[in-house]
Amino acid sequence: MKDSGFNPFEMAQSQFDNVADILDLNDGTRELLRNPMREYHFNIPVKMDDGSTKVFRGFRVQHNDARGPGKGGIRFHPQETVDTVRALSMWMTWKCAVVDIPLGGSKGGVICDPHNLSAREQEQICRGWVRQIARDVGPFADVPAPDVMTNAQHMLWMLDEFEAIAGGRFPGFITGKPVGMGGSLGRKEATGYGVMYTVREALKELDLAPEDTTASVQGFGNVAQHAIEAFHLMGGKTICVSCWDQQDQTAYSFRKNDGIDLDELRNMTDHFGGIDKEKAKAAGYEVIHADDWLKQEVDILVPAALENQISKETVSRISEKVKIIAEGANGPTTPEADAVIKDRGIFMIPDFLANAGGVTCSYFEQVQCNMNYFWGKEEVLEKLDMKMTDAFHAVSEMARKYKLYMRDAAYVIAVNRVAEACRDRGWVS
């Protein structure tokens, strides 16, 4: 599903260059924002269960912290590359800026496959990652969080290791922790719900009722599941989802024309978001090619898996019926595909706006940890809804006022805020 020649960092830089031209940024500001401020590459030696020692490669990239401490997840993935981490750190900078929270952009990763690692081995990777980077992260410098194939347990192991090194209790060091151990209620729902808060507002602009719309979703992990949950609560119907099958080492799409049953699918899904193919067939789902989620005759497409999924090769598969694309994943659409989507007049809700609910709720978790006072779930989701709705309307108004594509409008707002912070600090003229 991924193009081996695809470089996400080059794509992120290309997107930035386009907006730098719109904003007429000077050369110094362009150079500063086009590349990470600092990055760390390191080895993590782990004693495996069979007695051997395996060395895993880890990264932390800090793109920009002019607006506040770095913020960004840590992903465990066998195809992880430093260019992926660089791109994600840059997108995190824009994501925090577009929803106007006082944080910068960072990202981390480890080249590994948790599917093939025991819990003890995963714990040792988590603790080893922290030992390598502890001097350069922290609650007031750079705050990690979960990402692809990491979860609340991983974050708690990392917190425990950081606190052992730092000699104190610092719950604000990391977010995405278990509730009751410094985690925030509403965090697991936040990214997926945030995607649908923006879809709800887009439907209003298009004068469409949610109950009259259908969706197709790529992915069935945490983001996708909660996006579907929120969409169904709005009255919408999801007819297709796709996911990775660990046993077959390939992906499939699962379609049911009268609408999927979310709880039913959840009950046949592993903790990595993989749906049991045989159980799905028995439950009446049609098992189709992985990329067929893109071809569905639906109103809304939600890519909520990995980057580079809507490309110049695949964009032509999008049905004429599609009216909205809401990017739950980071970087799922390439610039070449973007141009086609723009020409077709599809309402694009770009990734760093659509999926900013996760980092917004992570910010809420930081605030709660630093206050040592925690909010109820309803309060968290109300605050999240308000932040996401305000951000959406700011971008939409910018797009209408200056006749910009939604992605360009979001970038103009975000990049301008970060550039102003750099100028105010005296980093650039």
Image (tube, rainbow, N blue to C red):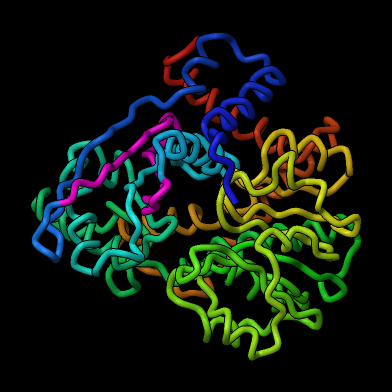
Query: Is 58 inside the magenta-drawn segment?
Result: yes
Q: Position of residue 286 (x, y in %)?
A: 72, 79
Identify which residue is drawn at 85% across, 32% down.
Answer: 403
* 60 or 264, nearer to the observer: 264
Residue 251 placement, left or right of 272: right
Number of labels in the image equals: 0
Which region shows up in magenta? Answer: 54-79
Query: Is 11 inside the magenta-drawn segment?
Result: no
Viewer can see residue 383:
no
For the view shown, which residue lies furthest in the front direction?
248
Q: Position of residue 243 (x, y in %)?
A: 57, 67
Residue 14 vs 154, above or below: the answer is above
From the image, give the main secondary structure of the stretch colored magenta.
strand
Q: Position of residue 37 (x, y in %)?
A: 38, 25
Residue 316 placement, left or right of 153: right
Identify which residue is drawn at 27% across, 42% down.
Answer: 57
Q: Position of residue 185 (x, y in %)?
A: 43, 72
Identify which residue is drawn at 37% across, 64% down.
Answer: 151
Residue 383 placement, left or right of 198: left
Viewer can see residue 121:
yes
Residue 138 vs 182, above or below: the answer is above
Identify which residue is drawn at 19% across, 46% down.
Answer: 55
Quarter occupied by residue 289: bottom right
